[in-house]
Amino acid sequence: MDTLLERRALISAAVTVFIVILLFVFNLQRALVLGAIGGAAYGFMALGLVLVYKSSGVFNFAQGEFGTVAVFALWGATSNDIPYPLAILLALVAAVVTGLVTERIVIRPLFDAPRVTLLVATAGVALLAIGLEFWFGEPKLRAVEPALGRLGRFKLFGAAVADQEILLIVVLLGLGILLALFFNRTNLGLAILGASQEPTATELVGISVRRLSSFTWALSALLGGLAGVLAVPIAKTFGPGVMTSGYLIPGFTAAVLGGMTSLPGAFVGGTIVGVAQAVAVTAPAMEDVPGQSALAVFVLLLLVLVIRPQGLLGKSA
Amino acid sequence: MTATAARKHDEADEPNAEAHGHGRAPHKPTPAGWVARGLFMAFVAWLVLLFPLSRDVSDLRIFGLAAIYAIIGLSLNVLLGYTGQISLGHQAFVGIGAFASAYMVSVQKQPFFLAVGVAMLVGMFQALVLGGVALRVRGLYFALITLSYGIMAEGTLFQIEKFTGGSAGQEAPLPSGFESPHRYYYLCLLFLAAVIFVDWRLMKTKGGRALLALRENPRVAATLGINVKLYTLAAFVIAGAFAGLGGALFAHNSEFVVSNSFEFRLALIFVIMTTVGGLRSRTGVVVGSAFFALLAFLIEHEYTFPVVGWHFNVESWLQKLPGPDLTAEIAPLVLGPALLLLTLIQYPGGIGQQLRPLTGWLRGGRFDIHDRGEKEVVVADVRA
């Protein structure tokens, strides 16, 4: 166990150092900063995706919409002059409720269905949410203010860092540590891990797998909601389906990159995806290529699946 | 187990075999029964073949699209239905077929049928390349990689100016001899019939039975000597050919192709229409795909019954719902996913299964409202 952990830590350290050196050599430090910031949002998405995958083996395509629902709730609350902290709380409650409803209505009846069916079902949930957003929200862009408005507190390698971006990274790191403690130290966390590995045995020792499933979906919806309310206001405007179109695929790539079952992997993966996108957008060689960031994500995904299908920090299947 | 399942599927195609069990003589319809069946078939034929003649040009494009969607639905059915792999990047396959055909006709000045052939070849080629890489990993990862490919194609491949005309788009005129949308509609129907025929024959071959076996349990199939990867790749290539054909027809149906007609949303609509139609049921997939192609039209359309004097319009009903107006543009976005979830949770066989009493009856069986056709085999353990 220790050697495995050591090896994993070594791999991630080596990859990180290699990438950082590469970026300095090609004079792309700015991309490093932009990428790390952008990657934090992807890491957030990946965290929620990994959580659900770990506990029930589902690729949750509705994860992005948990975030969008929260953003819409935040917008609704702030435009009705509800104080910002309360508005964030309402937004997170909206996300959690969406997660619980999804679990109850869609996931639970399909508990024993093939995983591909569940994937289609969660994609259906995402589409339904987007459809409802179009219906009630009209296809237009809305503006939402960030929690911390100050821009450019300091500059790092020529990239201005806004307060909201710092907040995003701090919350992500804090949550990551809390989650790691939760899964390793608490009974509930251990029960979730147990249920994912041996559902029958878990039931036998008196743990309700179904109740655990509700809890994991609520938790991952909370993570999705947090990603939404923290990341979307950085771009200021949003429309229906914002999190699905902008964050879901990079989030998935980050999760796969990290090994799909590894929480630290989700962070590392998120950062790598963010940096790859930032490099693709800022590198002079890529200037004439349209759609660089989606291309970067695709190439990265292909490379990982060809070279190391189990991900950077994943266990081999 | 897989062998019996494959045989079961064969039997399900025969009238009476499954539904009426053992010990009872097969149902023989009376002459009047055959007349009733004939009349019903005649009505369907009238609806598909003669009714469109009386409509004007703009409607015909939508009807043509229904036939094209049916081809695309059958393409996705090969993957999702027969192999259990899901492609979330099918809009890219269709789009590349569309651009290949438009490029051959407008830039290279080649005849239409050659262009369609090229579009199918291009579809097969990209399926071969992408599948060669992506099928190293099965199941959920395959979905992810096709999804990422689709989004990449939308942003990068479709923006290559020489090939697609960039944001200005590419012209794709109606082929000579089929200049009127009416004639082109029949051409699309002809291609659809060809695809249905090929799909039907292919599934009767050894390869088709192997595909059914490996969908149910790839491990058991592998122990029976089925080369799982090879057959899955072959299915992917066939799906690519059908998608390329669908794309080519799509391009010429609208006479113009632009890259933003192939958004990610389209890929999800394809998945929805195939699933709601009913996986592994050709009738269901065709009906489901056509239904989704026509959905906006069906909602907007003003229905009139000349003899009794009824007339109604679905859009005006929808606007009575609480909340903002549910227009014909937005309604499919809400109704489609709702139908998908309903299908998955309550009626996993989709439209194909709902139509089963009717199709069984048309084949000369009893009209049995409880006829559900082949039993769904649920293999719980296909976690990837």
Image (spheres, coloured by chain):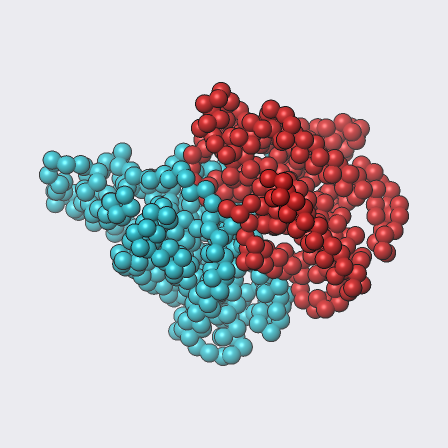
Q: Is residue A133 above or below residue A93?
A: below
Which residue shows up at 80% across the image and 36% down it?
Answer: A147
Q: Nearer the viewer, residue A153 or B291?
A: A153
- Using residue B170 as the reference point, say whether residue B289 is left or right of it: left
Which residue shows up at 86% across the image and 45% down it?
Answer: A151
Quarter-wise, where is residue B368 in the image? top left
Farthest residue to the right: give it: A154
Place of residue A108 in the rendered image (x, y in percent of width and height, measured from the top left): 48, 30
Place of residue B176 in the rendered image (x, y in percent of width and height, measured from the top left): 42, 74
Which residue shows up at 42% across the image and 45% down it?
Answer: B275
| Visible residue check, residue B267 | no
- Using residue B339 as the reference point, say whether residue B373 is left or right of it: left
- Using residue A40 as the reference point, say whether residue B104 is left or right of it: left
Colour that chain A carries in the picture: red
| Visible residue check, residue A31 | yes
Which residue shows up at 27% across the image and 41% down it?
Answer: B373
Colour that chain B carries in the picture: cyan
Farthest residue to the bottom: give it: B109
Farthest residue to the top: give it: A206
Q: Nearer the viewer, residue A21 or B140?
A: A21
- Using residue A233 as the reference point, say whether residue B306 is left or right of it: left
Place of residue A138 in the rendered image (x, y in percent of width and height, measured from the top left): 64, 42
Marks counted in the figure total: 0
Quarter-wise, where is residue A46 in the image? top right
Which quarter shows the N terminus of chain B?
Answer: top left
Place of residue B248 in the rendered image (x, y in percent of width and height, measured from the top left): 46, 66
